[in-house]
């Protein structure tokens, strides 16, 4: 409370000074920068940054449910983009007034900043001294730091440093000989060259189209929204598409565009963002850090482009803060504001395997380029933890499938079921830990999860003797009463807990090569290459992985024409053992990288069988593209597996049964229906008989009536007097007659119509249920299900690269030109389905043959479209010496790093 009120006073002052400054500087240099930005504003230049909380990371898994078999189904893998947000910063005024928050709206005990919206408007490249008054000509003297307009990351105190002498150094020595990856291509014929170059030009034209749209409508923002022609910033607004595309521009020979982009990179300020409270560490590493390093490498580390490396270091220095935990396992969503970074933290108890394990290549390459072992140390410790887990069986809270990992891991290093060492007063263990001064093995108790990601102390950590172990006391720190007793290390007294390695989160476990796991496995062989074969553990880890995948996850789908193809299933165990394993035969676009991984590992570790598996995996994804009406594979679906991988014949009846798990009940329903129908018919006959009898009786009565009327008529014509059949009485009679038919009051059978005859009203017939055949036919028709597929859970295609990635690896590895033909068909189908006026867009439904109309577009063009998908297509038709796999190794975002020679 106290702190927030103080903060408010500061904000009010800031507000007033800001207004003053704004007026003074209207004609100053600020106009210059405003001009620059306005020139690139989209139509929504007045829109405010999206104050909504940031979207979950792209690799997050959606909620799970169980199907009729009890198999786990993942409904929504949330690979998609975050909801579109008109998050283009203001063109004018350049400075936004911080919103004042009600102090009652205090969030948590951590002095959490209340809202992203309290940040001023910031743009990439605007450092806070530009707001401080130093730049203006008006001569107003304002101390630069008096205006907290933007909060910036600051280098925090390090709680758990690795002593210099304990750093794990980059392996050194002469790189080991590694078998070549690429096929030894022969000279191509002039005809082949011409065809290839034509295709290459078409692919480049699409990249130019997408880049032009980004430049025009979303320059320096994270993403173009290719339908509405705006920008959005899901990745902190540091120009994700721009950074991610750099090496693609270089490879495609778009040097002017490359130089423009490098100039913009200089202006990126990684120390602040108005868009997010937390930095998504995995995405930031693979896209931004990988993008900068890949771009620097493709220039041949040209000193002219040194800024790329400098920026990579700038970003990495911020990211290094995530490793400052007792066991050096990283925080994966880094709350970057000083109020958070200054506190001791602990890694998540539920960390995604992919996010934890896919930082290694980028930090390794950075260590190589800078000679700084600390970057390598940071990721080497994660590898070591994975190596330990890979070999630990489930009875030791390890893995149920040795070789691969459960999808979510407790990386906190803290065994909460064991008593903390400090509670074992003067026990030998506690004494030893103390004597070793071994911070790295300590773990806390008394922590609270910080949005399931990392742990932050429940109270500020300070030492009132002035003997600071932690950061200096901050002006906006908590009142003194919040102090807790400290231990000898300046940490709270309750910090200790028993150490443990990586273990699965919870007792069950999900195992797959899909979105939450993929790139951790992908990086084992790639790290081996990047390190020149000098670290053998990456080889053994890869070999254990592929053996486990081959044995437990790969399956052949049952498909028309019996193609010999493979996919990787998802396995789920409820109790952490192999006995209880249930399989889900999923086909997901993300898993399509696997062909490339098997192919690459098969070549460099001389495992020809793996190359063959890689081909079948790559062909599986090609099949999934070609079988869809749009010619593009859906994001997430299920197929029917063959009984074995060796032989399999397409069996339509089996497919129908898979499409209709209730087939047997449908038979019972049908029998029931026939019984009801027979009863109904009997009843109808009975009613008809009754009705006929009634009709006869009515007829007789009517005849009697008319005889009486005729007699009356005779009387009336001879004696014209009033009778009981006077006009009034007759009308009344007709009305009664009509009422007896219960006529509608809406006049449809109103008084002007002939009275309808007294019809037989029958009871409703029983509704015929669908037969198994009918039901299946309806499903296939309504859901556009191609043969072999069982469910199409997510029909989108979001411009993903993994399928063409594997096709490219297969082409470079085998030299078989049929891969180019497969890739070309994919390219044409994708462009037809996704092209918009401003770029290319994710589409909603690949099961229709016209997904490319505006209404079926998702309005999203993620940065991997230019960084990966178009790059792989391009490289498939480039000469094989361009980004040769014998000289380069690509990170999971397709950024090429130089292999050591
Ligand atoms: C945690 O501690 C308990 C009790 O000492 C022990 O039985 C268990 O094996 C430990 N768990 C791990 C993963 O080390
Ligand atoms: C533990 O050891 C310390 C010093 O080594 C001593 O002061 C303290 O009394 C001991 N505590 C117990 C419970 O024996």
Image (cartoon, helix red, strand yellow):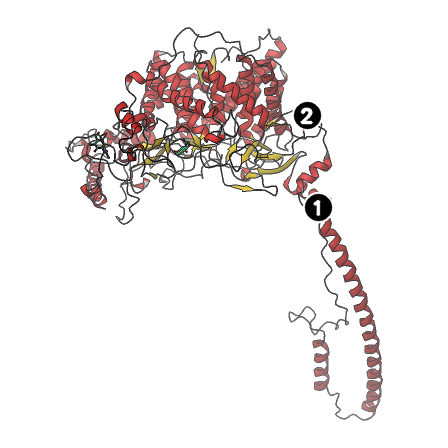
Q: How many marks?
A: 2
Asked whether disc 1 touches disc 2, contact meaning CB atoms under 8 Å apart, the reply is: no
For residue 724, above or below residue 676:
below
Q: Nearer the viewer, mark 1 or mark 2?
A: 1
Residue 416 visible somewhere in the drawing = yes
Q: Which residue is mark 2?
A: 563
Relative side of 32 to 77, left or right: left
Q: Earlier in the sequence, mark 1 or mark 2?
A: 2
Identify which residue, 843 or 660, lies in the foreground: 660
Label 2 CB sits under 8 Å from any ligand 1 atom:
no
Residues packed near mark 2 inside 10 Å, few (<14), some (14 to 19) or many (20 plus): some
Identify which residue, 606 or 418, lies in the foreground: 418
For residue 890, above or below residue 854:
above
Relative side of 472 to 574, left or right: left
Tell me what residue is drawn at x 82 percent, y 80 percent. 702
Q: Which residue is mark 1?
A: 664
Q: Which quarter of the figure has residue 42?
A: top left
Relative side of 650 to 709, left or right: left
Q: Which quarter of the figure has residue 316?
A: top left
Question: What is the C-alpha distance between the residues marked 1 and 2?
Answer: 30 Å
Identify which residue, 704 or 391, lies in the foreground: 391
Tag 1 secondary structure: helix
């Amino acid at each position: 409370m106290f702190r927030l009120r103080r903060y408010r006073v500061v904000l009010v002052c800031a507000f007033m000074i800001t207004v003053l400054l704004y007026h003074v500087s209207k004609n100053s240099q600020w106009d210059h920068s405003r001009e620059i930005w306005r020139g690139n504003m989209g139509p929504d230049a007045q829109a405010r940054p999206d104050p909504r909380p940031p979207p979950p990371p792209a690799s997050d898994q959606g909620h799970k449910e169980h199907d009729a078999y009890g198999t786990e189904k993942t409904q929504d893998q949330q690979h998609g983009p975050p909801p579109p947000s008109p998050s283009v910063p203001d063109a004018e005024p350049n400075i936004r007034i911080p919103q004042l928050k009600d102090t009652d709206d205090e969030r948590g005990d951590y002095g959490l900043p209340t809202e992203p919206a309290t940040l001023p408007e910031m743009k990439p490249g605007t450092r806070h001294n530009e707001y401080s008054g130093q730049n203006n000509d008006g001569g107003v003297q304002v101390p630069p730091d008096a205006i907290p307009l933007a909060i910036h990351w600051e280098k925090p105190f390090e709680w758990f440093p690795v002593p210099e002498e304990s750093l794990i150094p980059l392996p050194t020595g002469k790189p080991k000989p590694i078998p070549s990856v690429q096929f030894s291509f022969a000279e191509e014929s002039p005809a082949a060259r011409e065809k290839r170059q034509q295709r290459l030009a078409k692919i480049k034209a699409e990249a130019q189209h997408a880049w032009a749209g980004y430049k025009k409508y979303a320059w320096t923002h994270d993403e173009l929204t290719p339908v509405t022609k705006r920008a959005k910033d899901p990745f902190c607004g540091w120009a994700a598409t721009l950074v991610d595309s750099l090496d693609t521009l270089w490879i495609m020979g778009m040097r002017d565009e490359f130089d423009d982009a490098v100039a913009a990179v200089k202006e990126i300020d990684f120390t602040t963002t108005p868009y997010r409270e937390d930095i998504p560490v995995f995405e930031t590493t693979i896209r931004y850090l990988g993008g900068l390093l890949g771009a620097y490498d493709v220039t041949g580390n040209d000193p002219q482009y040194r800024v790329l490396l400098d920026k990579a270091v700038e970003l990495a220095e911020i990211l290094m803060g995530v490793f400052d935990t007792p066991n050096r396992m990283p925080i994966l969503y880094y709350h970057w504001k000083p109020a958070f970074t200054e506190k001791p933290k602990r890694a998540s108890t539920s960390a995604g395997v992919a996010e934890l394990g896919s930082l290694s290549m980028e930090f390794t390459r950075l260590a190589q380029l800078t000679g700084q072992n600390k970057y390598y140390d940071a990721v080497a410790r994660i590898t070591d933890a994975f190596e330990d887990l890979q070999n630990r069986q489930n009875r030791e809270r390890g893995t149920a499938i040795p070789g691969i990992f459960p999808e979510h891991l407790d990386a906190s290093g803290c065994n909460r079921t064991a008593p903390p060492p400090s509670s074992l007063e003067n026990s030998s263990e506690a004494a030893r830990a103390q004597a070793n001064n071994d911070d790295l093995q300590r773990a806390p108790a008394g922590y609270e999860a910080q949005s399931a990601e990392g742990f932050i102390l429940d109270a500020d950590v300070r030492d009132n003797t002035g003997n600071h172990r932690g950061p200096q006391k901050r002006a906006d720190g908590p009142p003194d009463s919040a102090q807790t007793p400290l231990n000898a290390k300046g940490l709270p007294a309750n910090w200790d807990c028993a150490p443990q390695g990586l273990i699965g989160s919870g007792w069950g476990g999900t195992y797959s090569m899909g979105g939450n796991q993929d790139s951790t496995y992908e990086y084992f062989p790639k790290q081996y290459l990047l390190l020149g074969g000098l670290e053998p553990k990456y080889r053994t880890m890869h070999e254990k992985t592929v053996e486990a995948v081959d044995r437990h996850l790969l399956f052949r789908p049952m498909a028309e024409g019996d193609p010999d193809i493979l996919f990787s299933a998802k396995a789920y165990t409820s109790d952490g053992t192999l006995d209880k394993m249930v399989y889900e035969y999923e086909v997901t676009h993300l898993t399509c990288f696997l062909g490339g991984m098997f192919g690459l590992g098969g070549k460099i570790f001389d495992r020809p069988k793996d190359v063959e598996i890689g081909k079948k995996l790559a062909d599986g994804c090609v099949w999934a593209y070609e079988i869809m009406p749009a010619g593009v594979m859906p994001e997430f679906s299920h197929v029917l597996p063959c009984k074995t991988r060796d032989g399999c014949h397409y069996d339509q009846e089996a497919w129908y049964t898979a499409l209709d798990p209730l087939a047997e009940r449908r038979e019972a329903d049908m029998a029931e229906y026939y019984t009801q129908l027979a009863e109904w018919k009997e009843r109808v006959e009975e009613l008809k008989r009754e009705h006929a009898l009634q009709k006869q009786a009515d007829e007789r009565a009517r005849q009697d009536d008319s005889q009486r009327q005729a007699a009356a008529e005779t009387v009336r014509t001879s004696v014209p007097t009033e009778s009981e059949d006077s006009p009034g009485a007759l009308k009344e009679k007709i009305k009664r007659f009509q009422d007896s038919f219960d006529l509608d009051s809406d006049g449809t059978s109103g008084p002007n119509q002939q009275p309808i005859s007294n019809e037989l009203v029958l009871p409703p017939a029983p509704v015929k249920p669908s037969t198994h055949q009918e039901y299946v036919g309806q499903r296939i028709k309504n859901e556009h299900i191609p043969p072999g597929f069982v469910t199409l859970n997510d029909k989108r295609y979001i411009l993903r690269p993994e399928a063409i990635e594997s096709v490219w690896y297969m082409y470079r590895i085998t030299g078989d030109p049929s891969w180019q033909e497969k890739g070309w068909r994919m390219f044409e189908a994708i462009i037809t389905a996704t092209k918009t006026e401003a770029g290319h867009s994710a589409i909603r439904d690949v099961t229709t043959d016209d997904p490319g109309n505006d209404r079926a577009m998702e309005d999203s063009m993620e940065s991997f479209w230019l960084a990966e998908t178009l790059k792989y297509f391009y490289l498939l038709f480039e000469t094989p010496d361009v980004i040769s796999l014998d000289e380069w190794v690509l990170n999971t975002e397709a950024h090429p790093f130089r292999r050591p020679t």
